[in-house]
Image (cartoon, grey):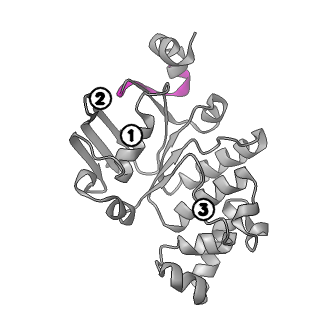
Amino acid sequence: MTDILTISDVSVNFDGFIAIDCLSMCLSPNELRVVIGPNGSGKTTLLDMLCGKTVPTSGSILFNGHELTDMEDYQISRVGVGRKFQSPSIYQNLTVSENLGLSSSADRGVWGTLFRPNSRDVNLQIEAVAEQIFLKEQLQKKAGILSHGQKQWLEIGKLIMQDSELMLLDEPVAGMSPKECELTAALLKEISLGRTLIVVEHDMDFVNLISQTVTVLDQGRILIEGTLDSVRKNRQVIEVYLGE
């Protein structure tokens, strides 16, 4: 199977501070990859590189044949890379339906979404995604009154509406209840049946629910990759991350 994402010898140097150090990794289509590591290990910088927020000092990032290091962030989004940040980025004063409509891959713009009726296909997509992210009953509610967990789900729904083929999720269950974490785990597994996901997470109970392959970063380098069980047993991981 051809890899959908290939990162080759990528480094990021911030005025002498090496945040990413000759990092290489590959992801297959429909893979759910979890990235863990101590604070400062390069996890967020990795996501920043993939979405164009940070330009690597050297190396190559190929996504579906596109060299991402040569592209602006909006161009990267257009070729199918979507990013969810730690804090939900939603339109608080718009309804759940309007938030999802604004993210539609139909790309009608803000004016078209708010002041012209959605097409039947877009409405059907909004309803389907709302049900998928557990917000079907909240479609006409303002996003600002949703619970924290529901806001997290809404932002994931926006990435689905964008038709992002590679979804970058930074701590998607931060602040969620145990039940919400379980629902989110099921949601991400479902999404990964048709998309590739990279999930940065600290909650090891949640990682246990979703992990296929786990990549451990330390000081901008890959310490180990493998199953969660093999990672947990690795002596270096225990020392630098699990703190035992």
Name the residue rendered at 56%, 82% in the picture. Answer: 113
Alpha-carbon distance for marks 3 and 1? 23 Å
The image quarter containing residue 216 is top left
Q: Earlier in the sequence, mark 3 or mark 1?
A: 1
* Residue under numbered circle 3: 90
Q: Is residue 238 left or right of residue 137?
A: left
Which-is-in-front pick, marks 3 and 1? 3
Q: Quadrant of residue 146?
A: bottom right
Which one is nearer the viewer's eye here, 1 or 174?
174
Secondary structure of the residue carrying numbered label 2? strand
Secondary structure beneath dot 3 equals loop
Image quarter (top left, top right, bottom left or bottom right) of the C terminus: top right
Q: Is residue 64 visible?
A: yes
The residue that appears at 73% across and 59% down in the rendered structure is 134
Q: Which residue is mark 2?
A: 18
Q: Earlier in the sequence, mark 2 or mark 1?
A: 2
Badge 2 amino acid: Ile
Magenta stretch holds residue 213:
no
Q: Position of residue 171 (x, y in %)?
A: 57, 41
Front one among 154 and 122: 154
For marks 3 and 2 on the same chain, the one whose residue lies earlier in the sequence = 2
Mark sitting on residue 145: none
In the rendering, which numbered label is found on residue 46?
1
Q: CA distance from mark 3 to mark 2?
A: 32 Å
- Marks 3/1 in contact by CB < 8 Å: the verdict is no
Three-letter amino acid code at the position of disc 1: Leu
Residue 20: image x %, image y %? 32, 32
First to last magenta residue range:
220-230
Q: Amino acid at mark 3?
A: Ile
